[in-house]
Amino acid sequence: MPREIITLQVGQCGNQIGGEFWKQLCLEHGIAPDGTLQNLEPATKSEAWQHQMGLDDRKDVFFYMSDDDKYIPRAMLIDLEPRVVNKLAKQGTYRNLFNPENLFIAKDGGGAGNNWASGFRQGEEHAEQ
């Protein structure tokens, strides 16, 4: 039975860790930074055996296939301040990997400024978006 995992990357730390997570996942599953599948030869005997036996990895757990045959992460990138999300999804090596519809950056873009009360108030304002 197929299972899907959706990751929520929230705030600076969540998005920085999430960026590294997706980079490693792409390497492990042979997915290029633009979401296309790379044809990689199995690196170990175990991987070669799995490939021969039809036990290929399950990319569909973490990724979904778009109409143009690209793998898109099942991820939501959320932050009140745009710097980290923009670095991942608009400027970095993996900028073509993420779906722009799955990004949320606050319109004022000020962030919480390391102030929990400010972040809580802004979170309430953006909760319905």
Image (tube, helix red, strand yellow):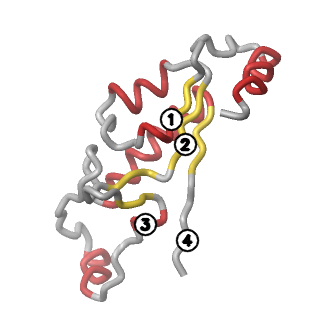
Q: Quadrant of residue 29?
A: bottom left
Label 4–label 2 contact, CB within 8 A: no
Q: Residue at x 33, y 34 (%)?
A: 95
Task: Tell me the element at label 1.
Answer: strand
Q: Residue 17, percent across and down?
A: 53, 37
Q: Residue furthest right?
A: 117
Which of 22 and 60 lies nearest the eye of the viewer?
A: 60
Disc number at residue 60? 3
**SS for dot 3:** helix
* Residue identifier under label 1: 103
Q: Is residue 37 left or right of residue 102?
A: left
| Residue type beneath disc 4 | Arg
Q: CA distance from mark 1 to mark 2?
A: 6 Å
Query: Disc 2 marks which amino acid?
Result: Met
Q: Give the residue number, with chain letter if any, for mark 2.
A: 76
CB atoms of marks 2 and 3 within 8 Å: no
Q: Secondary structure at mark 4?
A: loop
Q: Earlier in the sequence, mark 1 or mark 2?
A: 2
